């Protein structure tokens, strides 16, 4: 039984380019107990990284955006190396980090505005947040908007989710692609919880 669990943990870690020797209390506990959870997590991670509507590089960059957002240095480092092996450029990797930072500012700001929707003063004041990174993204407008949408979903900003979902569609993105992206970031967030 332990041998099968060890292979499950190994496969899970390989999927996100982490060393099989990685030790983590929660992951190791589930692995040693051979729980259904670690098997499900491995299947979920493997499946979302192979979504039909995303290229492998796009899937890894979306996963990287969540790792940066959630401050998982170990996963961000492994996914950066995996993205580079998929020919991600330094400019693209920098843009992922820039998008994460910008979405954190926007998600807080627009979530506040949404919470305070009854106060016209807050609604009419200019945001005053520079967003030039969004104008001509290296990764392309549709993918940048898709990543912005996914991060906004992770960060729980309804107004940003609604806005970016419409923008993704206006740039040719499909609902299937949006759905796969949201499922991917949800699963990667769940992985980060036990890393």
Image (cartoon, helix red, strand yellow):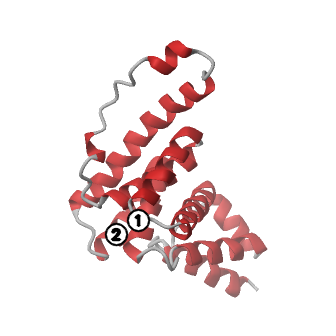
Residue that carries the numbered disc 1 in the rendered image: 172
Residue pictured at 50% horizontal, 67% vertical: 174
Q: Is 149 placed left or right of 38 in the picture?
A: left
Q: Tell me which corner region of the image, top left, top right, bottom left or bottom right, holds residue 159.
A: top right
Q: Is residue 35 visible?
A: no
Helix, strand, or loop for circle 2? Answer: helix
Observer-nearest residue: 22 or 162?
Answer: 162
Comes first in the chain, label 1 or label 2:
2
Q: Is residue 43 above or below residue 171?
A: below
Separation (CA) of disc 1 from disc 2:
24 Å
Observer-nearest residue: 9 or 140?
Answer: 140
Assess whether mark 2 and mark 1 are in contact (beta carbons under 8 angstroms): no
Residue 102 point in image, percent of width and height? 38, 40
Residue pictured at 51% horizontal, 72% vertical: 21
Q: Is residue 108 visible?
A: yes
Q: Is 78 placed left or right of 12 in the picture?
A: left
The crowding category of the residue bearing disc 1, from other C-alpha atoms within 10 Å (few below 14, some 14 to 19, many at least 20), is few
Residue 180 point in image, percent of width and height? 56, 68
Residue 165 point in image, percent of width and height? 51, 53
Residue pictured at 59% horizontal, 29% vertical: 114
Quarter of the picture holding the C terminus? bottom right
Quarter of the picture holding the N terminus? bottom right
Residue 115 point in image, percent of width and height? 62, 26
> Which mark is in front, 1 or 2?
1
Q: Is residue 160 above or below residue 122?
A: below
Residue that carries the numbered disc 2 in the rendered image: 83
């Amino acid at each position: 039984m332990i041998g099968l669990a060890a292979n499950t943990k190994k496969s899970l870690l390989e999927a996100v380019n982490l060393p099989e020797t990685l030790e983590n209390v929660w992951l190791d506990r589930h692995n040693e107990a051979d729980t259904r959870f670690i098997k499900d997590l491995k299947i979920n991670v493997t499946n979302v990284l192979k979504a039909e509507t995303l290229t492998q590089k796009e899937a890894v960059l979306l996963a990287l955006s969540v790792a940066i957002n959630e401050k998982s240095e170990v996963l961000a480092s492994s996914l950066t190396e995996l993205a580079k092996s998929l020919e991600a450029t330094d400019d693209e990797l920098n843009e992922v980090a820039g998008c994460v930072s910008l979405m954190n500012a926007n998600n807080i700001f627009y979530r506040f505005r949404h919470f305070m929707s009854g106060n016209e003063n807050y609604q009419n004041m200019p945001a005053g947040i520079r967003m030039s990174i969004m104008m001509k993204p290296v990764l392309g407008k549709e993918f940048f908007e898709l990543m912005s949408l996914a991060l906004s979903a992770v960060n729980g900003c309804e107004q940003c989710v609604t806005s970016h979902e419409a923008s993704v569609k206006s740039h040719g993105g499909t609902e299937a692609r949006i759905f796969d992206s949201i499922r991917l970031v949800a699963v990667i967030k769940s992985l980060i919880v036990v890393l």
